[in-house]
Amino acid sequence: MEDVIIFSMPEINWINMDEGFTSGSSIMPQKMNADVAEKIRSKTLSLRIIRNNMCCNERTPSGYNKDSAETKLAILDSLKEVISTVKIATVMLEKITPNSEVMKKSILSLLQLN
């Protein structure tokens, strides 16, 4: 997601994001922020997912399974979060269009520097 955010920045402008996945900046309303991509990126370090993972990684003696009964809830919660995020990311990525001419100009300018 980091690349999507960077490549959609006005300074780079390699891709156009569908307006449904962006919002205007409070300072510059014409600038569109990649809000959904930023939210997806933040979910990779979500404390909720990390907490659920820690719950499932708890070590107990062999044959003692009462403590692991709560792991089902953590696993289901994480799966729900991951599946919904992947669905949103898929739709967002399908609606991204490349700015081929801007990309070509950027590459050519880099080649001229060498």
Image (cartoon, rainbow, N blue to C red):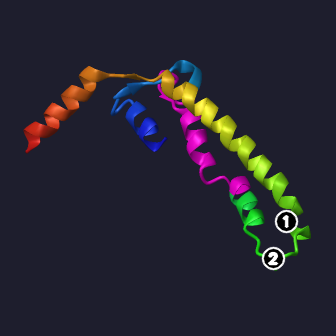
Question: Percent from the top left, x then y, of residue 89?
Answer: 57, 33
Residue 39 in sight here: yes
Q: What residue is at 74 percent from the left and 60 percent from the top?
A: 51
Q: Quadrant of residue 36?
A: top right
* Chain part drawn in magenta: 23-49
For the C terminus, which image quadrant?
top left
Badge 2 vs badge 1, beta-carbon distance below 8 Å: yes
Magenta-drawn stretch contains 41: yes
Q: Quadrant of residue 80?
A: top right
Q: Quadrant of residue 71?
A: bottom right
Q: Secondary structure at mark 2?
A: loop
Q: Please give the residue where the numbered disc 1 appears in the rendered image.
A: 68
Q: Please give the residue where the numbered disc 2 appears in the rendered image.
A: 60
70 to 34, vertically: above or below: below
Residue 22 in sight here: no
Closer to the camera in the image, 25 or 102:
102
Mark 1: amino acid: Ser
**For marks 2 and 1 on the same chain, the one whose residue lies earlier in the sequence:** 2
Circle 1 packing at 10 Å, graded few (<14), some (14-19), many (20+), is: some
